[in-house]
Amino acid sequence: MIDLSPPSYPDLIFRTLSNFAWPDGAACGVILAWHVDGEAGPMASDRSVVNHVAAISEAAYGLTTAMPRILDLHRDLGVPGTFFVPAHVAERHPAVMEAIVGDGHEIAHHGYMHENVFGLAEADERALFGHATAILQRITGRRPRGWSAPGWGVTEQTLSIMASMGMAYDASLMERDVPHMVDTTAGSIVELPISMVLDDWALFGSSLYGGGVSSLTSAARAEAIWREEFDGLRRFGGLFQTTFHPNLMGRPGRLVMLERLLLGMRACDGVWWGTCEQAADHVRRLDVEGQTNA
């Protein structure tokens, strides 16, 4: 029998800041965010993939071969980045984490083994967050202040756990163009919205296991799509936050395209560039000021 009753939505309040503005009066914001899934990506749903040497090698490419080029690009552009790293990947590549931190970038939470937490019991999800947090803090010397959802699995429980742990922000939701607040029963966090338009997996995603998937869009097409989105977000004051995977965007031809794209964006006036942490702190300050002046 068909269910015609209205669904019960999560008990969350998505709160726009009436006083929101980008720092220094900028027209829009840009965050270069990297999802460094590494070997955890293919193993997230099937630990036996650890024995699939080709799949593991493709995943590791992003750390061993592409990451030095990516860090060089950030240095050349003079912009910081946020690197969402599964804790297992940080354990496996501590020298890469040291290089990322040493260049002044942010390392943020991305699960332990890139787990999609949708459907996890609260105790299991809380244990997962705590375990991965402890590992990242030990390796980087800092407690991660934000998270982006592997596989975009997010629930009310997830956001409440993050708030209860004192995390500053989430970077997983897609309803709005500008940063805003999410009020949960355990407290408030900043939401830094993302978009599938700026996710390289939609254009370049591939896997060598589970039947195999391959998307071989040209770099030129991706450049056109992302430049269009930047122009639109700059016009409407939004956040251009990427979801780039080093094993995909770090391929030579794509990285050359990305350099060209970013140089064009850097030539535009009125653009704020920063990390997720910096954006979240800015939004939190605005929220406090707005409540104080209300």
Image (cartoon, rainbow, N blue to C red):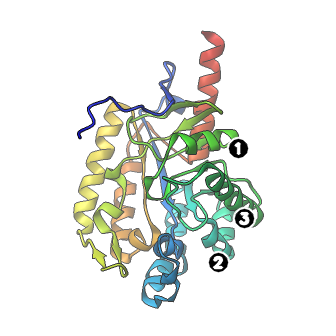
- In what element is the residue under mark 2? helix
Crowd class of label 2 (few under 14; some 14 to 19; many from 20; radius 10 Å):
few
Q: Are marks 1 and 3 in contact (CB under 8 Å)?
A: no
The percent coordinates of residue 32 (x first, y second) are 48, 54
Q: Amino acid at mark 2?
A: Arg
Residue 107, visible in the rendered structure: no
Please indicate, yes or no, whether residue 144 appears anywhere in the rendered image. yes
| Residue under numbered circle 2 | 92
Tell me what residue is drawn at x 72 percent, y 64 percent.
135
Q: Earlier in the sequence, mark 1 or mark 3?
A: 3
Among numbered discs 3 and 2, the one appearing first in the sequence: 2
Quarter location, residue 182 = top right
Position in image of residue 243 (x %, y %): 43, 56
Q: CA distance from mark 3 to mark 2?
A: 11 Å
Q: Are marks 3 and 2 in contact (CB under 8 Å)?
A: no
Q: Can you give x and y, in whole percent of width and height, for residue 282 in the image?
A: 60, 33
Q: Quadrant for the C terminus, please.
A: top right
Dot 3 surroundings within 10 Å: few (below 14), some, or many (20 or more)? some
What amino acid is found at the position of numbered circle 1 in the picture?
Met
Three-letter residue code for mark 3: Ile
Q: Nearer the viewer, residue 95 or 134?
A: 134
Q: Residue 256: x and y, percent?
A: 36, 69
Q: Secondary structure at mark 3?
A: helix
Name the residue that disc number 3 marks.
135
Q: Secondary structure at mark 1?
A: loop
Residue in front for this viewpoint, 127 or 217? 127
C-alpha separation, residue under disc 1 versus residue under disc 3: 15 Å
Q: Nearer the viewer, residue 96 or 227?
A: 96
- Residue at mark 1: 165
